[in-house]
Image: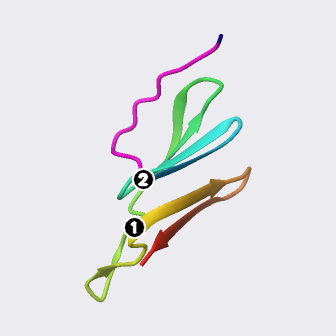
């Protein structure tokens, strides 16, 4: 049975798997993993920004991914 241990650089708030890609979002960054090789292929940095003293995304509660796009949704 194939398996892999993926160690995330920060605590995850949401994740979505659309094989062969896993998108995992932490508080400040999002991570795209290739599940075939169990490797981190891209980091999307600074997904949280302050606007008027508040975080723009607030609490991240959903992510989605396809072949071209990563979607990160928050609850303000």
- Of helix, strand and loop, which one carries label 2? loop
Residues at marks 1 and 2 touching, judged by CB atoms closer than 8 Å = yes
Q: Residue at x 54, y 60 (%)?
A: 62
- The 10 Å Cα crowd at callout 1, few under 14, some 14 to 19, many 20 or more, is some
Residue 13: which numbered mark, if any? Answer: 2
Q: Residue at x 40, y 54 (%)?
A: 29
Along the line of sight, the residue nearer the viewer: 61 or 57: 61
Q: Residue at x 46, y 28 (%)?
A: 6
Q: How many marks?
A: 2
Q: Which residue is mark 1?
A: 59
Q: Give the quadrant of the N terminus.
A: top right
- Of helix, strand and loop, which one carries label 1? strand
Q: Residue at x 55, y 26 (%)?
A: 38
Q: Earlier in the sequence, mark 1 or mark 2?
A: 2
Q: Position of residue 49 (x, y in %)?
A: 36, 73
Along the line of sight, the residue nearer the viewer: 46 or 74: 74
Q: Is residue 62 left or right of residue 8?
A: right
Q: Position of residue 37 (x, y in %)?
A: 60, 23
Residue 35: which numbered mark, if any? Answer: none
Q: Position of residue 12 (x, y in %)?
A: 41, 47
Q: Is residue 29 left or right of residue 66?
A: left
Q: Give the quadrant of the C terminus.
A: bottom left
Q: Which residue ends up furthest to the left in the rendered image?
A: 53
Q: Is residue 24 left or right of residue 53?
A: right
What is the spatial separation of the Cα atoms under label 1 and label 2, in whole angstroms? 8 Å
Q: Which residues are magenta?
A: 2-12
Q: Is residue 11 left or right of residue 23?
A: left
Main SS, magenta residues: loop
């Amino acid at each position: 049975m194939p398996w892999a241990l993926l160690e995330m650089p920060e605590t995850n708030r949401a994740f979505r798997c659309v094989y062969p890609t896993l998108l995992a979002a932490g508080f400040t960054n999002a991570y795209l993993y290739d599940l075939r090789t169990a490797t981190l292929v891209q980091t999307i940095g600074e997904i949280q920004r302050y606007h008027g003293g508040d975080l723009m995304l607030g609490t991240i509660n959903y992510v989605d991914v396809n072949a071209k796009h990563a979607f990160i949704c928050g609850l303000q």
